[in-house]
Structure formats: C-alpha cells, structure tokens
Image: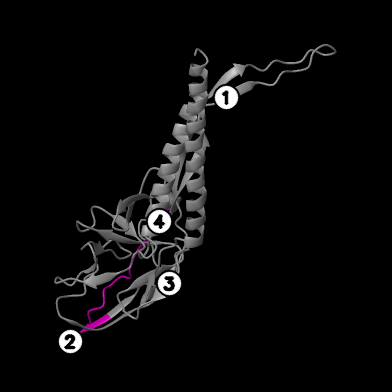
C-alpha cells in the first residue's frame, strides 16, 4: 500500500508537468513561428518480489519474474518543429520560411547566433534588418543585412532571399547577399531561449551548412508578405488535456483508496 501511495504521487506530479506543457502550447496558439512541445512518460524502478527461474526438462516449468512498479516519470519533453501554416499579411518585411531552414539573427554582430522561424522583421535607425528584439538578421555569408540610412522607398524580397531596395532618392540600396538560413541534423533538438529564439545544442548538432541560401540545397523558400503561424493543433491539445486530467484524477484516487486501506488496517486493533 505504501508503494501505491508513492506511485500515485508520482503520477499526479508528472501529469501536472504534462498539463504545464499543454497549457504553454495553448497559450502560444497564436504566437508566430511557435513550435509545440510534448511531454513523454516512462515507467521507473521496479521492485522484484520473485525472480525468474528456468524450467527443468521433464520436471518443472519456468517461473516468470514477479515485479511491482514504483511509479512513472517524465522521460522527455520534445519539440515538434513541423511546418506551421502561412498567414498572409501583405507586409514586405513579414517573412516566412516555407520548408526547411531557420532565420539566423545575432545580438552582437555575428559572434552569437540565434535561430528563429518568426519572420517579423524591421529596418532600424542604422538601416539594419532586425527582428522585434533588435537582433540583426544575417545573410548567407554571415554578414549583417544593411539597407542604408536613407529612407527606403521600394522593397522586394524574392523566394531565394534576394532583397532589392531603393531609397527615397532612387538610389539602389540592395544588399549584396540574400537572407541566410540554417539547417540542423536534428532540428527537434534545438534549445528554446524564449522570444521565439532557439540555440543549437549537442543533440541538434551544428548547422549542416554554416549559412545556407533559400531555395537551394534542400533549403525552403522565403515568402514575403507572409508569416508562419504556430503549429499547435488545438484538437490534439484539448484531447491531451482531457486524458491528462483523467490521468491526474485516477492517480489521486489511487492515493485516496490506498489511504483508506491503511486506515482499515490500523482499525483492526480496535
């Protein structure tokens, strides 16, 4: 009975963790470029009541092991980095990657690199192409994208990341290189940093190409005037919420029933 108490407690604790993951997914259902997460469970240590024994030919049959489980745990919380739907915004600097690849942004001129699928970009006062956090977007050569401090009059971004721009005086302000993208051996292994930013990890591996070019070599295309929506599926999330809630309730009931059994045992002396 004591084992069942602790097993039930582990079930409640870890179902709460799963509910936290589900709640975060639902909270980010309208976050551009957001990638959903999933909590995965695994059983834990077992206590062996009786060990297995081999059978003896013509005499005894084999005996199966008898084991009692001691609960469960969250084995992993994995990312789902699948493609989200594209939303038409009509704004030239709203960019979406249709296919493989991550935008590369930097807070320090290229020494530190972050990766994102959120393509809400702006031109700052220095003429740099930046995201909403002020991180500068890098091109396929690892350079910052500078559109100059003359005001931009016309701007067009092709599906291969090529930018053509002119200022208010009609001067060409087109950057030399297209927007860069990054791909990873295991993009599900990227580490989240918040603000739709990811960094590489030992599981994701280093970028396959240090800087890739859209619409070539397996990289996706750039869609100007579109944003990638969250890939959270509310149908799946609400279904998981119901099963998680019932799992939590069932584990709570296990604790309640185990407590009543202990109470009955203590009452035998009366």
* Residue picked out by circle 2: 168
* Residue picked out by circle 3: 86
Left or right, 251 with respect to 140, comes to right
Mark closest to the chain's N terminus, 1 or 3: 1
Mark closest to the chain's N terminus, 4 or 1: 4
- Above or below residue 245? Residue 220 is below
Q: CA distance from mark 4 to mark 1?
A: 35 Å
Callout 4: helix, strand or loop?
helix
Q: CA distance from mark 4 to mark 2?
A: 43 Å
- Above or below residue 36? Residue 247 is above
Dot 1 alpha-carbon crowd within 10 angstroms: few under 14, some 14 to 19, many 20 or more: few
* Residue picked out by circle 1: 68
2 and 1 marks in contact (CB < 8 Å): no
Mark closest to the chain's N terminus, 2 or 3: 3
Q: CA distance from mark 2 to mark 3?
A: 31 Å
Q: Position of residue 3 (x, y in %)?
A: 50, 24
Colour mapping: one colour
- Above or below residue 61? Residue 10 is below
Q: Please report the bounds of the magenta region as a residue range.
A: 165-185
């Amino acid at each position: 009975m004591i084992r069942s108490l602790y097993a039930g407690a582990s079930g409640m604790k870890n179902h709460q963790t799963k509910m936290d993951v589900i709640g975060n997914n639902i909270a980010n259902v309208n976050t551009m470029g957001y990638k959903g997460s999933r909590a995965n469970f695994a059983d834990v240590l077992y206590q062996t009541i009786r060990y297995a024994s081999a059978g003896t030919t013509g005499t005894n049959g084999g005996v199966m092991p008898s084991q009692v489980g001691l609960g469960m745990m969250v084995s992993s919380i994995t990312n789902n980095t699948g493609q989200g739907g594209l939303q038409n915004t009509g704004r030239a600097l709203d960019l979406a990657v249709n296919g493989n690849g991550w935008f590369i942004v930097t807070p320090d001129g290229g020494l530190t690199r972050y990766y994102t699928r959120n393509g809400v970009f702006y031109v700052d006062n220095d003429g740099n192409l930046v995201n909403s956090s002020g991180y500068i977007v890098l091109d396929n050569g690892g350079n910052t994208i500078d559109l100059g401090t003359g005001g931009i009059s016309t701007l067009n971004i092709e599906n291969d990341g090529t930018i053509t721009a002119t200022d208010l005086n009609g001067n060409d302000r087109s950057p030399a290189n297209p927007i860069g993208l990054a791909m990873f051996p295991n993009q599900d292994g990227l580490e989240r940093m918040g603000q739709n930013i990811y960094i590489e990890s030992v599981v994701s591996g280093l970028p396959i190409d240090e800087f890739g070019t859209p619409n070539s070599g397996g990289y996706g295309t750039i869609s100007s005037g579109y944003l990638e929506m969250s890939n959270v599926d509310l149908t799946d999330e609400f279904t998981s919420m119901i099963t998680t809630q019932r799992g939590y309730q069932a584990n709570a009931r296990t604790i309640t029933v185990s407590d009543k059994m202990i109470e009955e045992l203590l009452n035998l002396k009366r």
